Image (tube, rainbow, N blue to C red):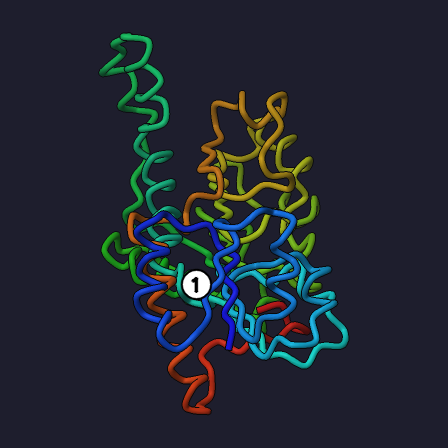
Amino acid sequence: MKIYIHTKFEENEALLIKEQLSEKYKIVIGEEIPAEKREEEFLSASICFGNVPLAWAQKTTQLKWLQLHSAGLDPYQQLTDHTFKITNLKGFFGQSVAETAVAGILAMYRGVNHLTQLQMQTKWVGTPLRSTLHLLNNAKVLVLGAGAIGLKVRDLLTGFNCKTTVLDSKTITQLEEHLPTTDIVVATLPETPETIGLFNKERLHLLKCTALFVNVGRGSAVDEQALIEMLLNNQLYGAVLDVTATEPLPDDHLLWQMHNVLLTQHTSGGWANENIDKIKFFLENLSRFECGEALVNIANLARGY
């Protein structure tokens, strides 16, 4: 049986896969073969680890299981007729993304973003900055999404005595009643038909001018132009954006220049051993596959996670 690997791994990471599986499987790592040969190798594989192009997935007749290296399912939601199982990394990035969200909040509230700029300019401001800083302690926080990320954000904020409300897919209808009194909004939502454009202009304008908007979910959840206009007009305190409508963000995009925006460049899912941990997850799921057991994280394409 052939396993095709469509994830970019370092040499030591690829070696780990080979050491674990080469005795039982034919292992083909896409990065190690010419680009023009990769589709052919994938189409003859029974198992794939990695996010192959949608067109390949639509064409395969041999594949039995596709393990994605992401939590997100885009573009595979477009699959309408497939016989293979799809698993994702739902929950895998909960801790790292939540830590980035909280780090971003603290950076904005405690002025770290501005202090870093002043350090680069060798400019000492000192005491006058003190009155511009804010406390996270006792803040009223609204977390959108009750998955691994949202729940971990809630847990991390307990140390700051935050009054945290978490809205899930069933309680999201209460969103508008919470927005006017919220200090910090943390969006951790996946991309689904229900979440696209959720934060439209009308909902954004329900927020206080002192509110901080944090998005570590998907850029499609917010009307980005409306958000920018509010930030420019000081109708919001600021924004921490791990995700944007277009990625990478174009060089001339206004968000780069905004003093009240912190961009974390979709890095929140990363950590030093991220790939090693992905491989461990795949190997554990492969063991289940071999034994005919239920795979972890069977994807629901219709729901988007």
Residue drawn where x is 58% and y is 71% of the image: 45
Residue drawn where x is 33% and y is 43% of the image: 103
Residue 170, picture quadrant: bottom right
Which kind of residue does numbered mark 1 sit on? Thr
Q: Is residue 266 left or right of residue 176?
A: left
Please say whether residue 74 is visible from this viewpoint.
yes
Count of labels in the image: 1
Residue 171 position in % (x across, y down) = 56, 71
Q: Is residue 79 left or right of residue 264?
A: right
Dot 1 falls on a residue whose secondary structure is strand
Instruction: Report the front residue among 287 and 215.
Output: 287
Residue 75, picture quadrant: bottom right
- Above or below, 237 relative to 277: above
Please say whether residue 177 is visible from this viewpoint.
no
- Above or below, 167 relative to 107: below
Instruction: Report the front residue among 140 and 260.
Output: 260
Residue drawn where x is 38% and y is 62% of the image: 278
Residue 188 position in % (x across, y down) = 50, 57
Residue 84, picture quadrant: bottom right
Please state, as top left, top right, bottom left or bottom right, where the C terminus lies in the image. Answer: bottom right
Which residue has dot 1 on it? 165
Residue 88 position in % (x across, y down) = 51, 68
